[in-house]
Image (spheres, rainbow, N blue to C red):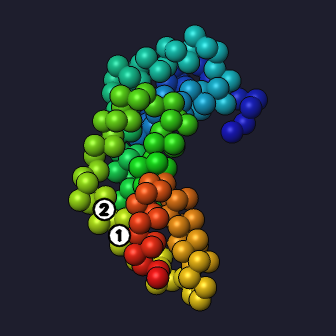
Amino acid sequence: MDNAKSYTVEEAMRKLESYCAYQERCHYEVNQKLRQMNMIPIAIDTIISHLIEHNFLNEERFAKSFTRGKFKIKKWGKNRILRELKYRQISRFNIQTALKEISDDEYYETFNALAEKKAAQVTEKNPYKKKKKIADYLLYRGWESHLVYEKVNELVS
């Protein structure tokens, strides 16, 4: 973005409306975007209030959408989703609400399928190294360690 360009509150508001309409955003992302546009704090507050009031910006909706997307598409576990939502300064309440979007059955199904697929891909012959590779992969994706170690021991003997 060109730093020399300056925006009126009205222009910035329109720009951020389309930014939010394109995909769900959180307050943190919108705030960063407005700072990049060199908007002053009072203008940022005004614009964010406008976006919330007109339902362009909704933190709970963002958290739910983010959670569903990262789980279904990227196959992230709850730890990774939680960490990413915290990084985006989403409230604990909205994080808890968002995590309820994932049913336990679907969660374990996805975890098992992902673990089995990874185990089949790892060509390592040494069982300890193979276990470590699978475990590291699943832990990086944010799956709970007790699930990971139990599954890895079941898959690699």
Q: State the residue position of label 1.
A: 112
- Helix, strand or loop status at disc 2: helix
**Residue 78 place in picture, x, y as percent:** 41, 49
The reply to whether residue 133 is visible in this rendering is yes
141 horizontally vs 95: left or right: right
Which residue is situated farthest in the top direction here?
42
Q: Quadrant of residue 23?
A: top left
User: Which of the image's four quarters has the N terminus?
Assistant: top right
Residue at the spot x=59%, y=89% of the render? 125
The mark found on residue 108 in the picture is: 2
Residue 91 sits above or below residue 156 on the image: above
- Helix, strand or loop status at disc 1: helix
Number of numbered labels in the structure image: 2
In this view, the residue in front, 86 or 23, is 86
Residue at the spot x=59%, y=32% of the render? 33
**Residue 17 place in picture, x, y as percent:** 44, 31
Question: Do tag 2 and tag 1 residues touch (Cβ < 8 Å)?
Answer: yes
Amino acid residing under circle 2: Tyr
Residue at the spot x=34%, y=51% of the render? 68
Label 1: how many Cα within 10 Å (few below 14, some 14–19, many 20+) = some
Q: Quadrant of residue 87?
A: top right
Residue at the spot x=37%, y=65% of the render? 111
In this view, the residue in front, 41 or 131, is 131
**Residue 30 place in picture, x, y as percent:** 53, 30
Amino acid residing under circle 1: Asn
